[in-house]
Amino acid sequence: MTGSAAPTFDLVSAADQARFMALQDEFAAAYTGLFDDPSLPRTVVIVPSLSLDPEVLAKVSGVHHYEERMLCMLLLLRMPRTRVVYVTSTAIPDTIIDYYLHLLPGVPGSHARARLTLLSCDDASPAPLTQKILARPRVLDRLRTVLRGEGPAHLSCYTVTGLERRLALALGVAIYGCDPALAAWGSKSGSRRVFKEVGIDLPDGFEDLSDPAALTDALTELKQRRPELRKAVVKLNEGFSGEGNAVLDLTAAPMDHGLRQWLRDRLPHMAFEARGMTWEVFAAKLGAMGGIVEEFIPGAVKQSPSSQLRIDPLGRVEAVSTHDQVLGGPSGQIFLGCRFPADEAYRRDIQARGVAVAEALARKGVIGRLGVDFISVRDGPDWRHVAIEINLRKGGTTHPFLMLQFLTDGRYESGSGEFVTPAGQPRCYYASDNLESAAYRGLRPDDLVDIAVVNGLHFHAAAGEGVAFHLIGALSEFGKLGVVCIGRTHERAAELYRRTVEILDRQRSEENGGL
């Protein structure tokens, strides 16, 4: 059973789509030579626009500072002839930029700074960054001027929508990311269709639901064929980080002719994961973007691993990493952070499933980074893996891994699922975007750097381990901070995280007179 409406995505004229594909083809033709030789000149324009559902984004604390999550890509400046352009809604304080440039291995900060261009729209409104850029002809002209430099250029975006395609066309450069025409494969409904095509396990459920009536029909059929089911999950097609999810408790559902009406009456009372979400808003979004219904996967021992992959412009698939996601929220569906690598007991299994999904997407023309999320339940000695969703974009697991890669100059070994330094030593990390406390409010970027230096909370290049911060701009107003703790083992990474929290808590307690 499915609804009748497919998800809607940005429409584009045939001529503009042809122009966009020509830019992408040029990028693919130059890709091998350019990316095999880091000494060649190039320009990377980083546009960390959160071109996602604005009402759901508004529920995320300090969300406008999430444009800072891609600052790890400033470490591309370690390549001596690479220029980086980083565009943001509002200016990023120099202290934060200096923090990242000082992380560069073997490159003088002044040399890197000369190859970095920072552009701001000076606009803190909730509109997507890319929309702000397109509305500012002088910002576009400045970008075109920078792009006239030596070597080819491309855009690197957090996600690629019709807005980013318009920007690529306006600048005449390609995007290293998924064509928006293929974005439906990264929706919740599209994910389910790909999983079925590949033949991997997925939750029992229905996709392409477009209104409350279709939702009620799907829930009714799911409960009738699975009488033992105690919970179901409703997901908006373009929800992210679990914020577009809602859980419906089915324990009291009558198994008779009154089931359909009971379910219809219960929809407004679902447990919404996003803070402040209402049924009226949720139903409107369901009509606009569609959604799915799935069984809630139970399990006494349950993990939420994720496989990260990359499809290059030539269609080649590379396994990038695996993570165990750290989840929270009312029913454990909100992304809080991650542990790398995923549990040794199953990381190669989810990697293999992720590769199969990526290969299917590559055949459809998808390129760029993507993630495939799972729920893994242990039944006796074995693990059962159920594929949940595909994210055709950079995600919460992207920037921590890039930090590890850039800081250590190491590599991911797909055979073992481990990351090793040039000396062959393994590295793990614990990362979080949600180190948050009201007590941290008022700490400025300069204060954080001072605390880090005094207490040794920084990355030690010689040892190849330590702490790196992100989301620093959210600290003073929201008391929120991101952190990547890199260690030789999972235990060492967790120890560094605990020490970081203890130091920040103690510092603020002492400053507040122990109150």
Image (cartoon, rainbow, N blue to C red):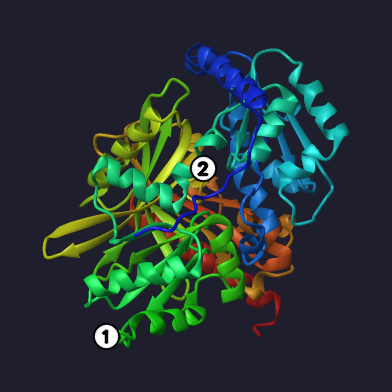
The answer to whether residue 265 shows anywhere in this view is yes
The image quadrant that residue 80 belongs to is top right
Task: Tell me: residue 63, above or below residue 298.
Answer: above
Residue displayed at 29% across by 37% down:
356
Tell whether 430 sits left or right of 77.
left
Tell me where residue 304 appears, x and y as whole percent.
34, 59
Give percent across and percent down for residue 38: 54, 18
332 is higher (above) or lower (below) than 266: above
The residue tagged 1 is 256
| In this rendering, position of residue 197 left or right of residue 238 | left
- 340, 466: nearer the viewer: 340
Dot 1 crowding, Cα within 10 Å, few <14, some 14–19, many 20+ = few
Given this view, does label 2 or label 1 mark the residue nearer the observer?
Answer: 1
Camera-side residue of 254 and 322: 254
Q: Which residue is mark 2?
A: 393
Q: Quadrant of the C terminus?
A: bottom right
Few, some or many C-alpha atoms within 10 Å of disc 2 (few <14, some 14-19, many ≥20)?
Answer: many
For the N terminus, give its image quadrant: bottom left
> Left or right: where does residue 396 sit relative to residue 222?
right
Image quarter of residue 302: bottom left
Residue type at numbered disc 1: Asp
Residue 477 position by quadrant: bottom right
Measured from the top left, where is residue 295 in percent x and y?
A: 31, 67
Q: Amino acid at mark 2?
A: Arg
Q: Give how far apart the Cα atoms at labels 2 and 1 are.
A: 43 Å
Q: Of residues 195 and 286, which is closer to you in this image?
A: 286
For image coordinates 42% across by 45% down, the residue present is 371
